[in-house]
Amino acid sequence: MDSESSDNNSGSSNGGGRHSSSPCGACKFLRRRCAPSCIFAPYFDTEQGTARFAAVHKVFGASNVSKLLFNIPANIRLDAVITICYEAQSRLRDPIYGCVAHIFALQQQAANLQAELSYLHGHLAQMEVSHPPPTPPPQQAAAPPVFSMADLPATTMAAAIPVTYDLSSLFEPMGQSSWAMQQRGMDPRHFMGGGAPSTTTTQSPPTAPSSSNASPSLSLSK
């Protein structure tokens, strides 16, 4: 009895373990038991992996994809799975061109954008030629510097300004000579009292010359 109960418990536990572990999307689509070493388990989850693997299996086949993943290094398997899924979905949308149609569409879009960019560059260049930039206003001539006497150094001012002024240059030479002659002709003793009288020679009026033929004067006696 004890052995039978233990066997039932172990069987129930094993059954519960099998039901608790869900298969990957690839194994769920293929309706097979998902082994621990399943090559599709790391890349096809349970929710969306089934739809993706359905497109891959329809276009490439499950056996071909498994062989491809086993023959490439593990570090680039994720990139390979992404590429395979993209090509499979593109082939289902466009059975003739597949992903090449999307490549052609992207190339055409790039060419259209390049042509539009070239047109805009030409339009901008034409606008710059038709509307030249405004000329800057003419610069005003700088005013000459104003100097004052305070700007000159002290040594320059002392050398430039004479100590005394000679006002004799303002008068005429003839006026100076006449003034000197008048000063020399005047005797200073006329202005000084108590001096000796000046000796001046007085000229007497001229007398008539005597003549022997003159008639004698007549004396009148009473």
Image (tube, rainbow, N blue to C red):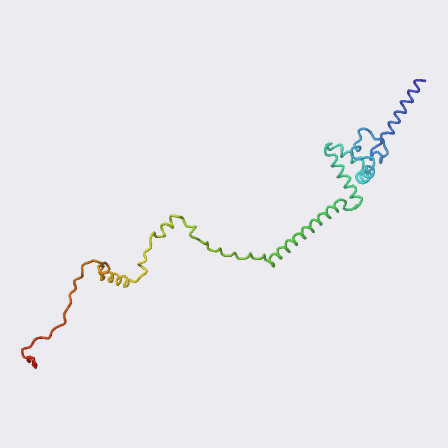
Residue 12 lies left or right of residue 157; in this view the side is: right
User: Front-most of 56 and 193?
Assistant: 193
Using the image, determine if residue 179 lies above or below residue 4.
Answer: below
Using the image, determine if residue 210 lies above or below residue 168.
Answer: below
Q: Quadrant of residue 174?
A: bottom left
Residue at the limit of the structure toward the front, as seen here: 222
Using the image, determine if residue 87 lies above or below residue 185.
Answer: above
User: Front-most of 219 and 16?
Assistant: 219
Residue 158 lies left or right of residue 176; in this view the side is: right
Q: Quadrant of residue 72?
A: top right
Residue 105 lies left or right of residue 24; in this view the side is: left
Residue 185 percent across, percent down from the top left: 22, 62
Residue 158 percent across, percent down from the top left: 37, 49
Residue 170 percent across, percent down from the top left: 32, 60
Q: Quadrant of residue 37?
A: top right
Residue 185 lies left or right of residue 20; in this view the side is: left
Name the residue located 60 percent from the left edge and 58 percent from the top edge. 131
User: Front-most of 141 and 67?
Assistant: 141
Using the image, determine if residue 88 lies above or below residue 116.
Answer: above
Residue 64 percent across, percent down from the top left: 78, 36
Q: Quadrant of the C terminus?
A: bottom left
